[in-house]
Image (cartoon, grey):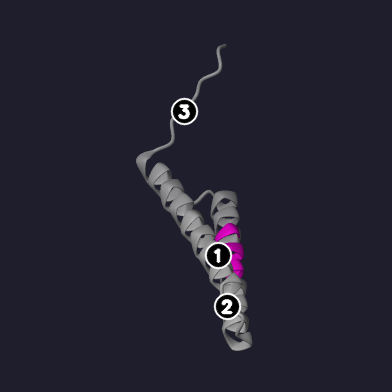
Amino acid sequence: MSPTYRMLDAATRRREAEIAELAHALAAARCAARLAGLGTGEFVVRELLLSVIHEINRAETAVVRLVSTSSRDGVA
C-alpha cells in the first residue's frame, strides 16, 4: 500500500490564511508600539504603549489557544 496525501479543503486553507494574516497584523502592531515607545520620553505615553503591547500579546495568546482548540476538536 502506498501512502496518500490528502489536500486540505478550501475552508481549512482559508482559515489558516486568515490566522496567518492575524498573526502578522499583531506582530506589526507590536513593533509599531515598541518603536513609538522608543521615540518618546514621556512617561504616560510610554506606559500607554506598554499597555497596548500587553493587550496585543493577550490577543495573540487567545488566538493560539483558539487555533489549538479548534484543531484538537477537529473543527474545519
Q: Which residue is the site of mark 3?
A: 6
Which residue lies under the disc numbered 2?
A: 40
Kind of residue at disc 2: Thr
Q: Residues within 10 Å of mark 3 (few under 14, many from 20)?
A: few
Work out whether mark 3 precedes mark 2 in sequence or the reverse, and give the earlier one.
3
Above/below status of 12 relative to 41: above
Answer with mark 1 or mark 3, whichever residue precedes in sequence: 3
Residue at 43% of width from left, 44% of height from top? Answer: 12
The relative height of residue 68 versus residue 6 in the rendered view (above or below) is below
User: Which structural element holds mark 1?
Assistant: helix
Distance in Å between CA atoms under marks 1 and 3: 36 Å
Q: Percent from the top left, x then y, of residue 7? A: 43, 30
> To which quarter of the image does residue 47 belong?
bottom right
For the residue pair 18 and 73, the one nearer the viewer reads as 18
Q: Residue at x 58, y 73 (%)?
A: 37
The numbered disc on residue 30 is: 1
Is 73 colored magenta in this rendering?
no
Instruction: Out of 41 and 25, give the one closest to the viewer.
Output: 41
Res. 50 mark: none
